[in-house]
Image: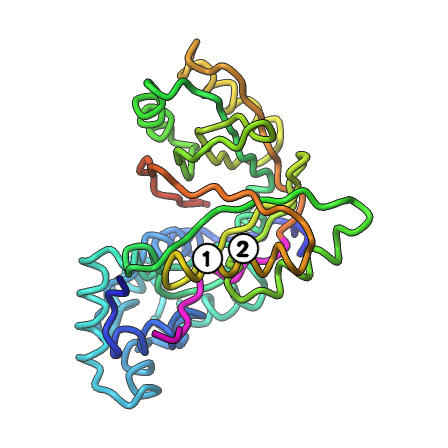
Amino acid sequence: MWLLDETDQAILEAAQDGLPVSATPFADLAARLGVDEATVLDAFDRLLAAGVVRRIAAVPNHYRLGYTANGMSVWDVADDVVDEVGERVAALSFVSHCYRRPRRLPVWPYNLFAMVHGRSRDEVHARVAEIETVIGEAARAHDVLFSKRILKKTGVRLRKEPR
Amino acid sequence: MLPHEPVELSAPQRLVLNRLQDGIAPTPRPFAALAEEAGVSEQVIVDWICEWLDQGVLTRFGPMIHLDRAGGAVELCALAAPQDEYEAIAEQVNAHPAVAHNYERDHALNMWFVLGGSCEDALDHAVAEIQHNTGLDVYRFPKEREFFVDLRFYV
């Protein structure tokens, strides 16, 4: 079920490509939408509390910050222990995302995905070896898929859909 | 978009860039406290944000939207694009508005993209359209469980 009201939707649609860059971005966004600044501030307070907005922040291009290697490490872990293993892998400081996902046999035997960023492929490989130690014998097979190129990075888009 | 050279940043710039990744509060003057801490004016911070957006150091400055918490749906997908058609297939996939990110990766499944939509049906439609446009099978990897981590790139 879609949980945003029309005001929330309008504010997020206007802000999703970025806030106005000024010392008063919320007032400027409000002016653009023709609403009070308080309406915008209240909406963001609620959306942050609900977790719909994770945070209002700078999203870096990690390549430009020196993190040029990004490896999606993928693991085949027995179903009865994968959740416990996932918690331990996610706790490692260099893991940026960690998910359990379905296998797609025979093409894809892996059910645990842990994204690892580093300043070089060697650093990523060393970190993947650390994950392997943490998982231990529960890791039946694994692979690392390095990103060769960003083909698109616009972020998740809100769109008005017919209801 | 190819990887770029890392940028050089001053100590106050690093402080500001790290703090801005942690996020700002929705207040009338969200940069005031940070400006004081960094020993610069609010306008300097605004100018740096502009500069970083222009240089591609930042891809965006704004709300990070968690679409599934809004009742929407997000899904990781992959396909195996033949090497000699790779660029054309990337264009076909990127052209779909539901595609939020798309990465080339070194595996038989060599194109990995994230779909976002207002509901599961929207994702089903997007997958069907991408399969139709590319003539390739799309493998879907919905998240069954998220183990919590919080991504930052401190400099």
- Identify the mark at residue B123; answer none if there is no mark: 1
| Residue found at x 62% / y 51% | A150
Residue A153 painted magenta:
yes
Q: Is B40 or B99 nearer to us in this picture?
A: B99
Residue furthest to the top in view is A137
Colour scheme of the rendered structure: rainbow
Tell me the quarter of the picture where residue A17 sits.
Answer: bottom left
Q: Are marks 1 and 2 on the same chain?
A: yes
Q: Is residue B101 above or below residue A12?
A: above
Image quadrant for the N terminus of chain B? Answer: bottom right
Q: Whole-percent x and y of residue A105? A: 55, 28
Query: As drawn, is A131 to the left or to the right of A79?
Result: right
> Is disc 1 in contact with disc 2, using a CB cutoff of under 8 Å?
yes
Which residue is painted at 38% across and 77% down in the image? A14
Name the amino acid, label 1.
Leu
Amino acid type of the residue tagged 2 in the rendering: Val
Q: Nearer the viewer, residue B98 or A106?
A: A106
Please give the range of residues in magenta: A151-163
- For mark 2, name the chain: B
Task: Depth check: give the residue in front, B131 or B11.
Answer: B131
Q: Which residue is mark 2?
A: B127
Chain that bears disc 1: B
